[in-house]
Amino acid sequence: DYGMSQNKVFYHALFRHMQAVGRRGCNRTAFELSKLLLSLSPDDDPLGLLLCIDYYALRCRMFTFVQDLFNYYDNTPKTHPQHHVTSLPNHLFSNALAKFNIESGVSGAGAKTQPNPQTAAQPSAKTLLEDALVRYPAILNALLEKACVPRESGIWGTVLNHYLFRASPETQVTETVTHLQNIFVERNLILWKAPNVLAFLQSAALGATQRYDVREATLLEAFHGNKQRVIPATVYRHILISNFSDAITTIPREALEEAAGNMGDLGAAEAGA
């Protein structure tokens, strides 16, 4: 029980150890630690392991694990405390990238001899990434900027000038969601800046604009649903105990206020903000 003060020390020690070994390139160890921490309280996930476990899984090429994790939460009832997981940016993008690596024949660790029927029934990697980009269009420009990709002209210029990816009232989201997007870009950039992955990203971005232009119903629903993102309290705790670059160390006041009613240990963090 994370609510017991004695257990919090144990949780936080494992979390810090996971971060430390991950920064030293021991991605498999970090992945196993994240699985261990999540298994201690899978329904509550008090430290927000679901915001980073997919990253460590991709880093050690556990592609099928990423897909199975996504499918598991995608099929949970809406009353499940972690049903929101498949609407978080990291899982939407990681699921697409895992599918892309499998389709590209990249050898992965822990591959199954018998594929999961739910995984096999998933749309193509390109379609999955198109859906992710429509839900979180601001991530595209942020990834390209971080990866130092020229985007003023050519195909990228055309894509970013499309209404779908331009800053507009329709694409505005809350500060909390913006912060969540920044965390994803900061942590996952290394996975998305390879030339073949950038080509995949470009193809999906073009596909998303084409689907938007023909007013595809499911795509428009996802696009207009951006403002209704519900961010659970465990996400804020994850932000508080994770160390990122100076670009995203400040938690938006809106996020603190939104989580204040759900997190008992948020008050100290707010006092120091």
Image (cartoon, rainbow, N blue to C red):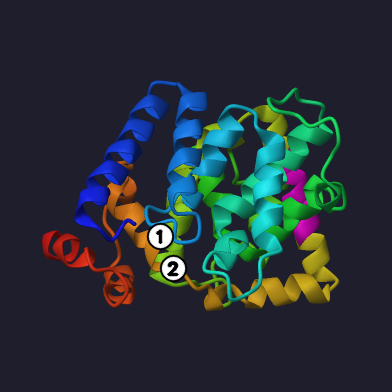
Which image quarter: residue 15?
top left
Residue 215 is inside the magenta segment? no
Residue 27 in the image: x percent, y percent? 49, 26
Q: Which secondary structure lies at badge 2?
A: loop
**Magenta residue span:** 200-208
Predominant secondary structure in magenta? Answer: helix
Total labels: the figure holds 2
Query: Along the horizontal axis of the image, is 193 left or right of 98?
Result: left
Query: Which residue: 87% across, 52% down?
Result: 121
Which image quarter: residue 61?
top right
Residue 106 in the image: x percent, y percent? 76, 25
Q: Which quadrant of the rendered structure holds the N terminus? A: bottom left
Q: Which secondary structure lies at badge 1?
A: helix
Residue nearer the viewer, 85 or 206: 85
In the displayed structure, 156 sits above or below 269; it is above
In 3D space, how far apart are the residues under numbered discs 2 and 1 (Cα atoms)? 6 Å
Residue that carries the numbered disc 1 in the rendered image? 235
Residue 24 in the image: x percent, y percent? 38, 21
Q: Are marks 2 and 1 in contact (CB under 8 Å)?
A: yes
Which image quarter: residue 155?
top right
Residue 188 in the image: x percent, y percent? 52, 40
Query: Along the horizontal axis of the image, is 59 left or right of 199?
Result: left
Query: Along the horizontal axis of the image, is 107 left or right of 246?
Result: right
Query: Which residue: 86% across, 49% down?
Result: 117
Residue 202 is inside the magenta segment? yes
Residue that carries the numbered disc 2 in the rendered image? 232
Identify which amino acid the numbered label 2 is placed on: Pro
Mark linked to residue 102: none
Query: Which residue: 52% across, 68% down?
Result: 81
Query: Which residue: 63% across, 45% down?
Result: 94
Residue nearer the viewer, 149 or 49: 49
Residue projecting furthest to the left: 271
